[in-house]
Image (cartoon, rainbow, N blue to C red):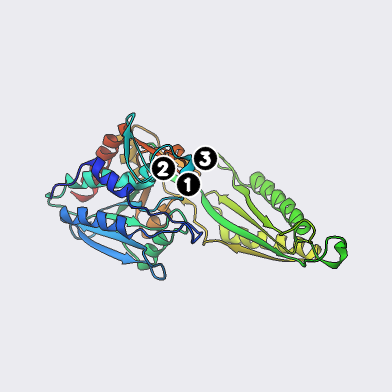
Amino acid sequence: MLLPSFQEMLGTLIAEPSVSCACADFDQGNLRVVEHLAGWLEGLGFAVEVLPLPDKPGKGNLIATLGAGDGGLVLAGHTDTVPFDEQGWSLDPFAMTDREDRFYGLGACDMKGFFPVALNAAASFAKAKLKAPLRMVATCDEESSMAGGRFLLDCGKPRAAAAIVGEPTGLQPIHAHKGMALISVQLQGASGHSSNPDIGRNALDAMHGVMGELIRFRAELASQHQNPAFGVAIPTLNLGCLRAGDSPNRICGYAELQIDLRVLPGMDADSLLDALRSRIEAVATAHGTQAALVALNPPVPPFQTSKDGVLVQLLCGKSGKPAGTVCFGTEAPFYQGLGMETVVFGPGSINQAHQPDEYLAQDQIRPAQSALESAIAHYCL
């Protein structure tokens, strides 16, 4: 079967809403995207397996395999997108628009655009006699909980010698990125009439102390941990979202602060969270309140592989760019956890992701396909 054109495939994928979000009001399934990918891959001769996610109706991963045996290569991407603000878009987010040498649409860059690139690269080998398998993987919920990547690790598949995670890196091979933890700090006080502060325990007063402790903790991390390979060379802790109280004439009985902690390779997010929990509980107790520190999702581990690895060097040679690092997280740790040399590498720029009028620059498409073809030839022929 001949594949549809690049534009047709990308337009079809963009037209299928697949937002993933921790807020149930915005969360959507991804199986329609998976069905399109499965059909195209089956037409190329791939054996396709869809893995529904437990307790997540309408969500699933896809693993498609061409050839048999051990080793080989995985081309991996996620099918979901972030939520969007329709008021900010000048174009229809669910219609692919070809304009100014760019393909616009929700997910065009991050990262539905990778799949037509990978499919066209795979089509070049559809009739070849492969010595090791070529696998394509499509996951769900990367933009929210990383549930799809975690489920692959739980299932123990796929297995291969190497994996390319096709996030938008501007065709620079990425050998390391930071880990991430999204955390809710919850303080329970006691409400009452604001005319007499002594009859309650103000959770906002306590949160003021907690925020000071978080800022001190952030400064300590920055002084103790640096890695000049990263554009932001220190761990970061962002105070992102505060919800508290309901009326100015009531003592605030409950407050929640959500924070984003990003750690360097070699740092253990779980041990940091334990240390942070102890410090926050001490501050809360001093204010007569109770504290809970809750991870909104399991932390995403930091990722690092050798710059001298076979796949890293192959992609550096094809792209003409040195191996680099990024501060955002990906599913790379889960593929690495399955025993593969893993590199993050794909068309598009992270600067266009997660914002209105998202686009994929067309001049990145052919070089990306050529690089993937070289990797397939190296690992599978």
Q: CA distance from mark 2 to mark 1?
A: 8 Å
Name the one closer to the observer, 139 or 28: 28
Rendered location of residue 308, percent (x, y): 38, 42
Q: Could one spot residue 216 in this view of the protein?
A: yes
Name the one closer to the observer, 159 or 81: 81
Please tell me how crowded label 1 is: few (under 14), some (14-19), or many (20+) other residues with Cα within 10 Å.
Answer: many
Name the one closer to the observer, 49 or 3: 3
Rendered location of residue 197, percent (x, y): 86, 62
C-beta proximity under 8 Å, tags 2 and 1: yes
Rendered location of residue 225, percent (x, y): 61, 46
Rendered location of residue 101, percent (x, y): 32, 30
Say which residue appears at 83% left-offset and 60% top-offset: 194
Give the amino acid at mark 2: Ile
Name the residue beneath numbered marker 2: 174
Mark linked to residue 230? 3
Of the image marks 3 and 2, the number of the one nearer the N terminus: 2
> Is 241 left, or right, of 112 in this rendering?
right
Helix, strand or loop for disc 2: strand
